[in-house]
Image (cartoon, rainbow, N blue to C red):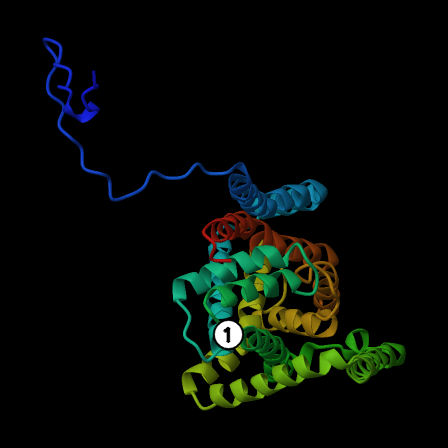
Amino acid sequence: MSMPPLDSLPAAAPAPGDAPRASRPPSPHPPPAARPLSAARPTSLTRLTRLAVTLLPLLLLGAWAALDRRAVGDGVARLGDADPRWLPAGLLFTLLGWVVAACVRQGALPERLPPGLLLASQLAAGAANHVLPASIGAHAVTLRFLRGRGIPLARATASLTLYSLVKPVARIPVLIVFLVAVGDGLRFGPLAPDRWTLVLAAGSAVLGLTTVALLLTAVRPLRRPVADFLRTALTDVRILHTRPSRVLALWGGSAVAPVLQGSTVAAVGFSLGLPLSWAQVVFALLIASTAVGAVPAPGGIGPVDAAMVFTMVSLGAPTGLSTATVIGYRVLTVWIPLLPGTLILSALVHRKVL
């Protein structure tokens, strides 16, 4: 007896109460494959690294505040006893200084940058500048910002170099103008550098140039990057100086910046009763930053402060008032903007702008 084929057998009847099932068409998208653990780990590590980098500026701010709490407390106490009518003027000059710094940065680059992000990057750079010496922090933040805007590395580096070179050069005519303005009441004896100081400065310059020449001669891999950098820098300088807006932003902003800083010092000094004129206070800042501005201290704090006190005392101000003015100036321009600047730096890092 032969068995009937299987496909000829009747299908099983559905049980009572069961609804007939409609056939589903095959899905055009295949089910997602299971994500391996090795792919999830880098993502978690990236998020952890980004969080650490975001919180790093705040941690550095807290450490610095703990180490320098005595100076901050003294400065805040002195500002608390000052005439409050002058302090808003000092804050205004500080804000204008950030705007001018952003203008100078734009003037050193042919490409147009977004104004809002450029100003925010300068606030963040100001916070980083008070952590690392010789403006390394500010230049690092600006370099990351420019690279994030699509600026090539050679052009971004050339822009930073041009910014650093133009600022001291533009300060010279401003210094001469204020030197003429306060020349009658100036005693050059205490301010004039002695022979050994001039010899040390000249020797340091010669040593630096000699070191660079020896490195380029001995290390061949450095020659091509340096040649590309010089070629890009010279090309950008030529392009920038054919645009009046860039020339005004670069050179005009570099000349105005120290005057705004000196005006902030003057506003703090007037609130404390400093017996100097506005021109004398601005000249004190100019001569101090020119004399010891190259010393690698974070934000110039330390050498420039001592030089400002020394210059104001040479102009006839009492030592106590000169010291109180400089401390109040640092609180107004460093400690008060440092918290918002650090928060902006963390926000820019978190949003991958830097």
Residue at image point 56% right, 61% down: 141
Residue at image point 40% right, 66% down: 115
Residue at image point 55% right, 76% down: 159
Q: Is residue 13 above or below residue 311?
A: above
Q: Is residue 273 something one can see in this rendering?
A: no
- Residue 1 rendering spot, x and y as whole percentages: 20, 15
- Residue 266 rendering spot, x and y as whole percentages: 57, 63
Residue at image point 46% right, 80% down: 110
Q: Is residue 294 something one can see in this rendering?
A: yes
Q: Is residue 332 above or below residue 47?
A: below
- In this view of the protein, which residue sits in the foreground, 218 or 42? 42
Q: Residue furthest top?
A: 16
- Residue 350 rendering spot, x and y as whole percentages: 48, 49
Q: Is residue 153 left or right of residue 284?
A: left
Label tally: 1
- In this view of the protein, which residue sits in the foreground, 287 or 25? 25
| SS category of the residue bearing label 1 | helix
- In this view of the protein, which residue sits in the foreground, 121 or 274? 121
Q: Indicate the amino acid at tag 1.
A: Val
Q: Is residue 265 above or below residue 103?
A: above
Q: Is residue 231 left or right of residue 243?
A: right
The residue wearing badge 1 is 104
Which quadrant of the view contains residue 244? bottom left
Q: How many residues crowd mark 1 within 10 Å: few (<14), some (14–19), many (20+)?
A: many
- Residue 199 rendering spot, x and y as whole percentages: 87, 81
Q: Is residue 207 left or right of residue 87?
A: right
